[in-house]
């Protein structure tokens, strides 16, 4: 039996415990002071964070970037914050969203391409799995683990496996659409026959959706509901709203469409020039920025009156869809103001890629069975409208190219950051910035160290982006050095940025697969190829690109690769054959069996 502890021993142990406890308290206080010292005074109080992701908006669609569409709520935020006029994403939704959430280049994050357009030979490669890699950690996870409430509504599209749904990626509450898109009036209506249904998830489980809604309104309604549920919480929040506007099908409430009647009757060429001039006046692009004529842009004057009216209606609906989204952003902002949360909130807006220039001719047979394309119904429930390549060239004005391609029109998009922590309002930042910069910036604003090689004992890919907080506080004009490279690749369309220079190649129909060199600071429209004037830089940057591509795990696309055909092949292989293979086989075999039976009977 142990002896009773003496009074002297008890006092000694008590003193030791007090010393340890005191030391722990001092160390904790010092650590807190150290953390606070790392957080700039402007954001010492951890801000709420609102991320607004538009879908397929062109560079000059936003009024604050030169557009004529009425976007007053977004414009008001943009003019109070910093607009980034040289900000780049991927040219497609999934790769961009993977980089937005992780700060890691898309191939290393596991989404080197949109799953639907990935060559079959690439699917076994970790860089092309089409969903977030287990080796990346999301900014939402890091914010949640540091005490943030985290919510997401809208488009997700970075993986629908259980391990990749929002609850496993750092979101407390979520209602998301897991696919590339869907109808904006009917949540269960597919926009293309990529799969048997639209996949909606609420808090990681299959969601029960209302029979009808309007997507932008519904996503903001749900976000406001989440904020209200926890309105008494002292914790700051992350609110991510992934809008479907302006993804196809382009749809909008009639009251917004009516406002644009006749607005686009002069055609896409006139609009493109007007937007270039407006962006110049705002200081978004250099004066007298030249533009190229895209091979996919038709001659407006060559269209007959009926065609012109139909095409103008398409753009009216497109503008209305953008304004309807802006209206819902206004509701969210008003809610935050009414609840006293606005002043301590930082707002970040971006489009996931440039304007959509596809014509969807390959899906016409299917669309005829699902939708009306009658001019009097465009924009409404049951109707299908697109922007198309000619209007897309105006949406990205004065840039070159559009969604899916590596021209500036496909990957340079409107972006601004405004609100708490921004002490350089009404500024335009012209330095090269990238979607991988967002996660490190949000962590810096929240006073959180970015993880390096490990997180919670697991090896992870380190963030490759830069912290933009010095830009937001007016401390620097550039976050990348003139000799620093930034690479890019999607579906064989590729680019490498170095200082003001951009090495780029595009496949058909917007390119010929050959490298070209542009100065995108002086010539953002990519009109003057400098490869003969700068042969040393042209050769060196090709070597730099190859080294970058090898390090990221980029695979070359097959020689006969066609993204539209690849989508069709993947749809058949991944959906139609597994689900309808037996019926298709029966449809082929029954006539043969009947013919054989008839022959046998005759014999």
Image (cartoon, grey):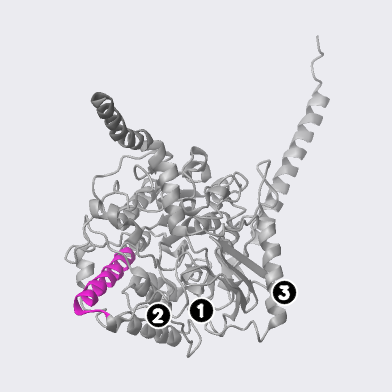
Residue carrying label 1: 427
Look at the picture and state if 310 lies above or below 384. Answer: below
- Asked if the residue at tag 1 contacts the one at tag 2, i.e. Cβ–Cβ closer than 8 Å, the answer is no
Type of secondary structure dominating the magenta stretch: helix
Pointer 1 or 3: first along the chain: 1
* Left or right, residue 268 beside residue 529: left
Residue carrying label 3: 540
Quick check: is 305 in the magenta stretch?
Answer: yes
Residue carrying label 2: 66
Look at the picture and state if 426 lies above or below 462. Answer: below
Of badges 1 and 3, nearer the viewer stands: 3
* Left or right, residue 487 beside residue 77: right
Q: Position of residue 173 (x, y in %)?
A: 43, 44
Residue 477 visible? The answer is no
> Mark 2 to mark 1: distance in Å?
15 Å
> Mark 1 to mark 3: distance in Å?
34 Å
Question: What residue is rendered at 42% in x and 41% in y?
Answer: 203
Where are the magenta residues, as a range?
303-326
Q: Quadrant of the C terminus?
A: top left
- Asked if the residue at tag 3 contacts the one at tag 1, i.e. Cβ–Cβ closer than 8 Å, the answer is no
Quick check: is 301 in the magenta stretch?
Answer: no
Query: Residue 194 got which mark?
Result: none
Q: Position of residue 347 (x, y in %)?
A: 46, 64
Pointer 2 or 1: first along the chain: 2
Question: What residue is rendered at 20% in x and 64% in y?
Answer: 254
Q: Residues within 10 Å of mark 3 (few under 14, many from 20)?
A: few
- Judge by depth and name the residue closer to the eye, 415 or 388: 388
Residue 317 visible? The answer is yes
- Judge by depth and name the residue closer to the eye, 579 or 477: 579
């Amino acid at each position: 039996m142990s002896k009773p502890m003496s009074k002297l021993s008890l006092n000694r142990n008590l003193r030791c415990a007090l010393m340890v406890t005191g030391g722990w308290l001092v160390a904790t206080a010092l650590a807190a002071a150290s953390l606070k010292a790392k957080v700039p005074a402007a954001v010492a109080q951890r801000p709420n964070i609102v991320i607004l992701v538009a879908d397929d908006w062109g560079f000059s669609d936003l009024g604050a970037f030169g557009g004529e569409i009425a976007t007053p709520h977004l414009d008001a935020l943009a003019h109070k914050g910093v607009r980034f006029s040289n900000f780049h994403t991927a040219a497609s939704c999934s790769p961009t969203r993977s980089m937005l959430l992780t700060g890691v280049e898309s191939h290393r994050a596991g989404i080197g391409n949109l799953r639907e357009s990935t060559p079959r030979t690439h699917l076994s490669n970790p860089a092309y799995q089409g969903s977030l890699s287990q080796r990346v950690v999301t900014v939402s996870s890091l914010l949640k683990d540091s005490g943030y409430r985290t919510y997401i509504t809208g488009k997700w599209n970075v993986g629908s496996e259980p391990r990749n749904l929002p609850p496993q990626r750092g979101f407390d509450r979520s209602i998301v659409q897991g696919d590339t898109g869907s109808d904006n009036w009917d949540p269960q209506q597919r926009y293309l026959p990529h799969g048997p249904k639209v996949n909606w998830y609420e808090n990681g489980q299959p969601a029960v959706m209302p029979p009808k809604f309007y997507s932008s309104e519904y996503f903001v309604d749900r976000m406001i509901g989440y904020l209200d549920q926890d309105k008494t919480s002292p914790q700051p929040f992350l609110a991510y709203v992934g809008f479907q506007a302006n993804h196809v099908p382009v749809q909008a409430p009639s009251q917004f469409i009516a406002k644009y009647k006749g607005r686009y009757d002069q055609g896409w060429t006139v609009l493109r020039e007007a937007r270039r001039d407006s962006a110049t006046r705002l200081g978004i692009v250099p004066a007298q920025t030249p533009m190229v004529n895209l091979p996919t842009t038709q001659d407006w004057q060559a269209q007959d009156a009926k065609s012109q009216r139909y095409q103008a209606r398409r753009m009216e609906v497109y503008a209305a869809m953008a304004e309807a989204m802006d209206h819902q952003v206004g509701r969210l902002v008003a809610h935050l103001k009414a609840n006293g949360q606005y002043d301590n909130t930082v707002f970040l807006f971006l489009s996931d890629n440039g304007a959509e220039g596809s014509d969807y001719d390959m899906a016409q047979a299917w669309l005829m069975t699902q939708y009306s394309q009658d001019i009097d119904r465009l924009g409404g429930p049951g109707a299908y409208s697109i922007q198309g390549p000619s209007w897309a060239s105006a949406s990205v004005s004065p840039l070159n190219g559009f969604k899916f391609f590596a021209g500036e029109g496909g990957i340079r998009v409107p972006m601004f950051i405004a609100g708490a922590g921004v002490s350089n309002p009404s500024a335009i930042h012209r330095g090269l910035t990238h979607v991988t910069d967002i996660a490190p910036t949000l962590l810096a604003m929240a006073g959180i160290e970015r993880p390096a090689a490990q997180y919670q004992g697991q090896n992870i890919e380190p963030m490759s982006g830069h912290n933009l907080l010095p830009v937001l506080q007016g401390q620097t004009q550039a976050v990348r050095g003139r000799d620093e490279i930034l690479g890019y690749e999607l579906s064989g369309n590729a680019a490498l940025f170095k200082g003001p220079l951009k090495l780029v190649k595009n496949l058909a129909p917007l390119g010929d697969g050959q490298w070209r060199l542009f100065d995108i600071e002086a010539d953002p429209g990519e009109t003057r190829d400098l490869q003969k004037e700068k042969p040393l830089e042209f050769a060196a940057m090709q070597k730099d690109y190859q080294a970058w591509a090898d390090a990221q795990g980029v695979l070359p696309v097959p020689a006969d690769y066609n993204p539209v055909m690849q989508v069709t092949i993947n749809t058949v292989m991944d959906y139609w054959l597994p689900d309808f293979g037996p019926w298709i086989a029966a449809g082929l075999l029954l006539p043969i069996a009947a013919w054989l039976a008839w022959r046998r009977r005759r014999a």
